[in-house]
Image: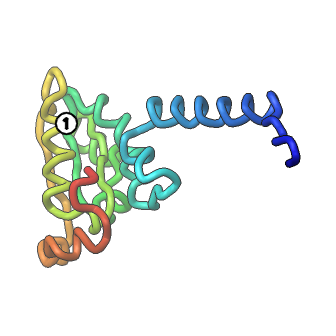
Amino acid sequence: MPARDRIPTAGIAAIVLIAASEAVFLTRTEPLSGWPVFELTADDALYVAKRPLIERAAGRVVLVGDSSCMMDLIPGEIASHAATPVINLGTILNMSPAGFADVGAEAVDQQPPPRAVVLAVLPQVFEVTEAQTVEWDQFGRT
């Protein structure tokens, strides 16, 4: 009977190193980008990119909404006319009204709270159903 080959020490070390790096990745990244592993969507990436801006919402006018908000409302131009700082947290339609409300609520939790939270969306946003939100894998991800 042939003797079993032992697993080389380098192989074990590589497996331990990979497992440790994955554990560090999952604990240090935005919750949306960790699970399921390697399934980050463009929608998630947009939200993850916007999250650090929520901390800057304190004392400002906060814009939340779909892509019409994200692309068309320029904080610098609004601030120059309103004489108050503005931050744009607009994302995309897939996030749904519930997602926009969550982002606005996170902004309101900042100290001091924002001066105002403005919802800027196209009417199509209100046609998004819960079933579509689940289909687009946005339900419960905000």
To which quarter of the image does residue 126 belong?
bottom left
Q: Is residue 47 above or below residue 121?
A: above
Residue 83 shown left or right of residue 15 in the figure: left
Q: Nearer the viewer, residue 5 or 109?
A: 5
Q: Secondary structure at mark 1?
A: helix
Residue 24 shown left or right of residue 114 in the figure: right
To which quarter of the image does residue 83 belong?
top left
How crowded pointer 1 is (Cα within 10 Å; few <14, some 14-19, many 20+) is rated as many
Q: Is residue 74 above or below residue 12?
A: below
Q: Nearer the viewer, residue 58 or 14?
A: 14
Q: Nearer the viewer, residue 25 or 124?
A: 25
Residue at (21, 27) in percent of width and height: 58
Q: Nearer the viewer, residue 116 or 131?
A: 131
Q: How many marks?
A: 1
Query: Does residue 68 appear in this view?
Result: no
- Where does label 1 land, which residue? 107
